[in-house]
Amino acid sequence: MILYLVIPCYNEEEVLPLTAEAVRKKLEALIAAGKIAEESRVLFVDDGSKDGTWDILRKMTAENPLFSALKLSRNTGHQNALLAGLMTAKDHCDAVVSMDADLQDDINAIDGFLQKYEEGCDVVYGVRNRRDTDTRFKRTSAQAFYKFMAAMGVESVYNHADYRLMSRRAVEALSEYKEVNLFLRGIVPLIGYRSDYVYYDRKERAAGESKYPLKKMLSFAEDGITSFSVKPLRIISTFGIVIAGLSVFGLLYSLISKLTGNAVSGWTAIVASIWLLGGIQLLCIGVCGEYIGKIYSEVKGRPRFHVEQLLLRDGKAGGKPGEEETPSPPPFCLEASRRP
Ligand code: UDP
Ligand code: MG
């Protein structure tokens, strides 16, 4: 069974050497134990990093055939980078494990993933047991994130980030989802093959700092909700109906005021309701606008990423990995080669 580890990296030069060393040891141990084939690889995806990430990756791939690297033309965000890696890996392997570059996810959970895979699961979710190594802010904001998503009608696996195993056919199925507003955690459960969970403890980031500041997290939550659920639109409609119902009382009140000759009093009520309703209307228009925005970008259907370079020795050329004996196919496939 050929396993590919897909790891998106954005400005991760600090943590990359540590990660590479850890995953190399893990994969070599798995290969030695006969759990995975020798052709298994680690595929790093450089998501348009501005630091030395690509240089490190290039060096690593030259030194060790276990490592391969994909360079995207620019920063496309974690979800797109992950998708790019999955789409590349699926042509070379039987199963893919996706994980972050910062070693926060316990790589020993992979044993559990493989076991579930052998038992016949197509998707295995890594679920965090506890988050006490995260900062308090990260923990509460992430917790709020899952709760809010659930309240807004998005089904996702609680406390599961993008650390999971997917079989080749699950990734093939994923490739049929063409949406531009990617929220993989929401899509994967929709695929529907047999799945299971593996629990692990989340660690601290090994080095460097989080690439998901609050702003990115909020926009991620918003993407997740508006790409997966029309519940906000429904809430707006319900709101409208309730307010329209209440306005009957308002009408009665103003009629009675007029009949009893107190028409001028009630100014406060009018001003207050103008502000309140104005605010509510603006909010509702905004929410509808978000959906129109989503439709706009989906209709354009722009490509989600562009591959600039792929450094991969998949070991299928006939020779053992690392032996560069056959000139064709070349030991390094250069897809989308650079201009001279
Ligand atoms: N990442 C990426 N592109 C981005 C932002 C992040 O590929 O635009 C990668 C990053 O290198 C890491 C993963 O996504 O491997 C998760 O990011 P991070 O660990 O910073 O997020 P957190 O764990 O703090 O939520
Ligand atoms: Mg992290």
Image: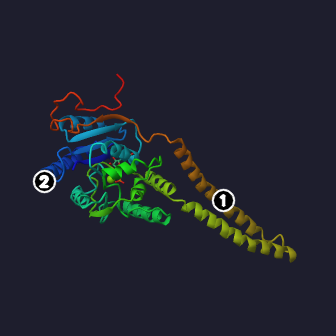
Direction from residue 220 to residue 53 in the image, left or right:
left
Quarter of the image with the C terminus in it: top left
The residue type indicated by label 2 comes to: Ala
Instruction: Using the numbered discs, state the Cα–Cα distance from disc 1 to disc 2 in whole angstroms.
Output: 63 Å
Residue 41 in view here = yes
Name the residue located 31 percent from the left edge and 45 percent from the top edge: 90
The residue type indicated by label 1 comes to: Gln
* Residue 203 percent coordinates (x, y): 27, 58
In the rendered image, the residue lying farthest to the top is 340
- Please state which of residues 57 and 67 is positioned toward the viewer in this rendering: 67
Name the residue located 67 percent from the left edge and 68 percent from the top edge: 241
* Residue 303 percent coordinates (x, y): 45, 40
Residue 116's image quarter? bottom left
**Mark sitting earlier along the chain (1/2):** 2
- Give the structural element (helix, strand or loop) at label 1: helix
Q: Are marks 1 and 2 in contact (CB under 8 Å)?
A: no
Q: Residues within 10 Å of mark 2 (few under 14, many from 20)?
A: few
Q: Which mark is residue 9?
A: none
Residue 117's image quarter? bottom left
In this figure, which residue is indicated by the disc labeled 2?
A: 33
In this figure, which residue is indicated by the disc labeled 1?
A: 281
